[in-house]
Structures are given as C-alpha cells and as structure tokens.
Amino acid sequence: MSQPQAMQVRHPLSVIFLLHIALEVPIALQGLLSPAALPFLQLNNTTVVFIKLYAALVAGTCAAALLCFSLPEFLPGKRALAIALCLYHVTCSTILYGAPRIIPYSFGPLAESYRVTPEVVWGTLHGLVGLGMAIWWQATVMMTAAMRMKAE
C-alpha cells in the first residue's frame, strides 16, 4: 500500500539532519582516525581516549541522521532522534560558550576583542543546529497530528 503523495514528500526543513552531519562528520572522522592531530590544547592519553569515544558516538548520530533524513516526518523514530539531537546540540553550545580556550587559533585581534573565538563560533553553530531541530519539530507537528487522526 502506498502513501498519499503529500506524505511522501520530505519537508524542506528536514535538511537540518544533513546540517547535523556537516557539523559533526569532520570531528568524527578526525577523532577516530587521528585524535592527537586535532587542534586542542593539553591533549594527553586520557583526553585522546575520550575524543575517540566521543567521535564514535558522533559518527553513530551522523549515521542515524543520514538514515532518518529521507523518512517521513511523522515517524516516532525520526522525531525521537530530532529531540535527542536538539538536546545534544543545545548542550554542546552551552558547554562551548562556557569553555576555556581549548583551540589555539584566533580570528585576529578584532574578533578577539568581540569574544569571537573558535570555541564561540563552534558553540554558535551547535546552537543553530539545535534551534533548527526544534523548528523542524514544530513545523512538522501538524503532519504528525494528521497521520495520527488518519490512523484512528
């Protein structure tokens, strides 16, 4: 049995799942393949192991996001992943905003004077993806409600 044409079309905001992948894949790959080469300050054996563990977790979320991207918006699994990713990105954003300098690069003195550091930019990107997940959730609530009514 096929779905109605309206339910087969992916919502344009589903691109947020791909944005999650774009933000996370670089750290996942580098963290798994060569964590000691990441531009972080004060790396030791413990932090390298934690980076590898984090990279494995992030790689898993990227795989899940890629698989969920093409699924219908009303499926509970896709919606659960969106909420989990929203919480993840908002938490990462908060952590990075409050973090001491861990990346030994600068965008220059002007940027530094406005507190624009790599950690803040990274935190902002996480915050935007988290917000995007929340917006996707709200934008697709009506589709979910319609499918629930249709099922009853």
Image (cartoon, grey):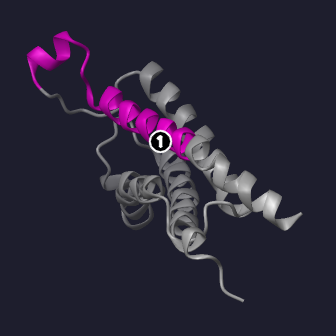
Q: Position of residue 37 (x, y in %)?
A: 30, 54
- Give the secondary structure at mark 1: helix
Question: Is 120 a magenta residue?
Answer: yes
The residue at 34%/30% (across/down) is 119
Q: How many labels sit on residues? A: 1
Q: Main secondary structure of the magenta part?
A: helix
Question: Is 4 a magenta residue?
Answer: no
- Looking at the rendering, the stretch of residues picked out in magenta corresponds to 108-136
Question: Image check: 150 left or right of 142?
Answer: right
The residue at 37%/37% (across/down) is 125
The residue at 81%/58% (across/down) is 149
Q: Position of residue 115 (x, y in %)?
A: 26, 15
Quadrant of the drawing holding the C terminus: bottom right
Question: Image check: 149 left or right of 98?
Answer: right
**Quadrant position of residue 72:** bottom right
Q: Residue furthest bottom?
A: 1
Q: Nearer the viewer, residue 106 or 15?
A: 15
Q: Position of residue 107 (x, y in %)?
A: 14, 28
Question: Image check: 109 left or right of 37?
Answer: left
Whether 74 is drawn above or below 38: the answer is: below
Whether 49 is drawn above or below 100: the answer is: below
Q: Nearer the viewer, residue 63 or 50?
A: 63
Q: Position of residue 67 (x, y in %)?
A: 55, 72
Q: Amino acid at mark 1?
A: Gly
Q: Return the residue at label 1.
A: 132
The residue at 72%/89% (across/down) is 1
